[in-house]
Structures are given as structure tokens and as C-alpha cells.
Image: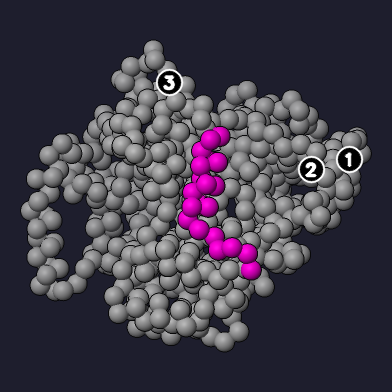
Amino acid sequence: MKLNKELPIVFMLGTLNWGNAQTQVSNLDKLGGLSWNYTKNKNLWILNIQQLDNDSPIQIEPEQLIEIDPYTLQFGKLNGRFSIINFDLMHMEWTIITDRIGAYHVYALYKDGLVQAIGDDLAELAQHSTKRLDYQALATFLTFGFFLDDRTYFEDIRILLPASIYRFSTEGILLEHRKYWEWHHTVDETRTYEQTLEEYDVLFRQAVQRCVRNGKVLLPLSGGLDSRSLAAVLPYDADVETYSYGYTDDSIEIRIAQQIAKTRNLSFTAHTIRPYLFDRLPAIVKALHGSQDVTQARQASISEWLSQHGDAVITGLWGDVWCDQMGAADGLAPDTSVTQQTVKKLKKRGYEWLLSHLLSDGTSRVTLDYLVSLVETGIQQFQHIEDIDFRIKAYKTSRWAFRWSNASLRAFELGATPRIPYYDIDLIDFFCTVPTDFVRDRRLQIDHLKRYAPDLARIEWQASHTNLYQIAHSRWLSLPKRAIRKIQRTITRKSPIQRNWEVQLLGKESRPQLEQWLLAPNLHISNLFNIADLSSLIDDFYIAPRAEGGYTVSMLLTISAWLESVL
């Protein structure tokens, strides 16, 4: 590719919701003094950036170099999952812009305080790292299930933060890091609940329209409300196929999803998740960047089917967060701080074993108190948000969504491009103006379905065992169903399979495969955990498999598979 010194080079990782790029770019491994590492032949596009004052698509032309001014471009109007990279040939510096929620992960490799390489493939980037493990970061991963803030496995690799503009010199000096958008909660006091409901409908339909306008789209349905809400507002002319997956052939989740699809005359495919993890573990852990429990990304089980049936997947990710409270709508319990309430939401059952058995790197052992102090420091950035519940929600989105939920998008990407309507910037701006009382206990979302999709509101909600018109009386109306299921469990002595780790780790062939990843000689995980402790843990887990044990074992499997792939 020839460089025009009068124009900057602009390329993008990811996709924008106003349209999909069609031009792949190559030969950018080394440019402008920095090394560029990216997913080869995928996700890297030349981009024609326009001032996005309206809903017009971004036009993509083959090998087109478009002049942009990174200081005046309205970055806040860029809507999608992306990272935009601009190289200013006149000033010989790079500008990198990340999306608002950090849905597309890009990393920087540092040496002596200078950036040496930037890329979206963490495993490949790690090959140029010193590979010194960051034990404090690992402790956050073990405790919360995701890496906190900008940390990764390695001391010299950091992730670029959301809603950010980074400027680097060609020597790798960080010239500037600033945010182009900040969290706030500015309640619109003039808008009634009914008006809020109507505005939500308009903006939600617009967000979904943006995500289904191009290509064949696949919509995963479940027994919850988020995917049902997506089905409720699909444009009549959208090219959409639906599917669902459960852990048994008679899964409640599949049954409800099938009802939703049938009610809306949508094509539907049911998938029963079988053991697949150990057969595909290296590819899956690499796709997740080792940054999410590998049993959580069950969408990886049908990646081949996704690639054969659609171009993109539209997911209801984060709808339940926007449309509910964080447990502090009525304030905090006595003697409970914002930090304590937040940590309560974040820490995983089963973390205690992991944190207490993690071997020290020669310094003092990482404690929960230290991790709590990290959360407290992070929450202080949102001190200007008066509503405590929304303050926690903003913190959770900036950390949990950024590092945990968004990692799962790469599992979708094994089969099709993920699109996330609830990450639409107009919807985010809207929820920053909605009182917590309007969304508590899924109020807004339930009322939206009852008003605009009564046919779907009459279908059972898995969480309540009743339809949405019976929510107020769900406790006693669901009693017969719950009693029958309890009797069935007592007679058969079988509990329903509700989690992917049960399918993947409790099968007949699973234990030898798990032990191969955790107990085999010369594994890197033996530098982090004592092998005798791991062996005892596995024995206890198979004697009495419980949720906390499932989390503990799954996280150990994740770390071991990742370290074996990159070290």
C-alpha cells in the first residue's frame, strides 16, 4: 500500500453500526515506528470517516485514504464495536480511538515506559512480551472473574480503556490520553414515566434497526427478557433467523425460546449443548484472550453453525443491567458502603480457594482487602453521580462489561460478527437520564413488552415461572410448577442442569481431560498453584460438585490452557 504523505492513514478494528467495511488491509505489521499486531485477514479495515451528524452510513472505498482531524472529529457519535487508528504523517504521531464501552479490545505492549507494539490479538502480542506474570492482576481475575481496570496477565501489556483518545509518538511515547465521553446520571425531571417508556421504544427500535440492516442476522433467544425484547422490535423486513441452546433436550430455555419464535413467525433452531470444550479448548481460550472462564462462553459450541447460517449475531448483552437496579435503589443497608455493595456484586462464589492458594511471587500475598481498595479507588471516579445505584451501575459497566462481558463477544466472533443493540450510544445516553425507580425490578422492560408486544408478554418468563401479566402474583401462581419440579427431582434424584460447567466437566470422559490440563507434569500452572492442592480440589469437586467448585475448577482450567498457549 502506497503512503500519501499529504493524508493520514486511517484504519479500523471492528465494525460500526452504520455499516460494515468491505475492504481488507494488509502489510501494516510495521508502520510509523510501531509494530501492529492484529487478527490476520479479519477485522482490519480502511475507513472513510465522516462527520456523523445524522444516521447516514459510513462509505467504504477500496484502499481509500481519507483525511480526518482527530481533534475535531465527533468521536462521541461513532457507534459500534471498534478501535479507530489514525497515523498523522505530517506530525508523525498515532491517534487511537476506542469505542464507548470498550467492546473491541486493543492492547499495548510496553518496554521501559515506551509502547513497542499495539494489537487486538493478545496471544500474538504476548510472544513479544517479557511474559512476567502480574500476580496482582491475576488475583483480580480469580476473585471477580475478570481482570480489573487495564491490567492483563503480563506486567508489560495493558488494555486500552473505553471512550478514550490515545496519542503516541512514533518512538512509543504516550503523548496524551483523554476521555471523549464521561459517565453521568442527569435525570430528566420533565419526562413522565409514560413518556420515558415511549422514548425507550423509539430509541430501542432504532438501535435494533442499526444492527440488522446489513446481512443475514442470527438472534439467540432465551427464557429471559432481553432477547425477547429484541424479537419484539425486529423490523418486518429484517433477514433474521433465531436459535436457542439448552443443556438438555427438554430445556425450559429452549421451550420458551421456541414459543417466542413461533409467535413471531421466525425461523428457529434448537441446540442441545453436548461436551465440546476439551476438543476445542486451545482455540476457545485463545479467542477469549484467556480473560473469561471458558465454560461461560457457551456460544462457542455452535460457532460452525453460526458461520453457516448468518453474517452477524445480535445479542441482548447488558439489557438486564440497564433495565434493573444494582441492589441500592432504596439506598444502602446499614453499615454498608458503596464499595462493599459493589464488591458483593462482583466477587464470585469459589474465589476464596483460588485467592488463598495462589502462590506468592516473592512479595506479600494479595489479599481481598487489597482488591477492595482497588474497587474503592475506581468507584471514586464516579463520586459525582448522586444516585448510588446508578453509580454502581456505571462502575460495573466500565469494568465488568468492559473486561468480562465484552470478552464473550469474541466467542461469538468464532462464527459470526457480534452486534450489541444495548451498547447503542443513543440508548446509553437515554439510560443516563432515567431515574432508577423507573427501571427497578425490570419495570420499564416489562411494561414495554406488555404495551408493544402483548403476544410475547403472555409467554412465560423463566425467572418468574409466570407470564408478564402475572408478575405481581408470581410467587403463588408458580407454586404448583415449582412443587411438581421438586417432586420430580426427589423421585429421579436428579437436579436440572443449569450451567455449562456441569455439561463440560461432569461427563464420563471429563475428569481425565481436566486432570491432564491441571495435574500433568511441567505445566505452567504449577508455578501458580501447588499440584497437591489442585489434586485435592479435583477430588473434592467430583465428590460434591457445587457452583462454587464449578467456578474454581473452571477458572483454573482457563488459566492453565491460556498459559500453555502463550508461554
Distance of label 1 from label 2 (alpha carbons): 13 Å
Across and down, in percent, residue 31 comes to 85, 51
Query: Which mark is first along the chain, 2 or 1?
Result: 1
Amino acid bearing label 3: Val
Nearer to us: label 1 or label 2: 2
- Which element type, helix, strand or loop, lies under badge 1? loop
Number of residue marks: 3
- Which element type, helix, strand or loop, lies under badge 2? strand
Q: Which residues are magenta?
A: 362-381
The numbered disc on residue 187 is: 3
Amino acid bearing label 1: Met
**Occupied quadrant, residue 551:** bottom left
On screen, residue 148 versus residue 478, left or right, reads right
Amino acid bearing label 2: Leu
Across and down, in percent, residue 40 comes to 70, 60
Nearer to us: label 3 or label 1: 3
- Considering the whole magenta stretch, tell me its main secondary structure: helix
Identify which residue is drawn at 48% across, 64% down: 355
Q: Are marks 1 and 2 in contact (CB under 8 Å)?
A: no
Residue named by callout 1: 92
Residue named by callout 2: 174
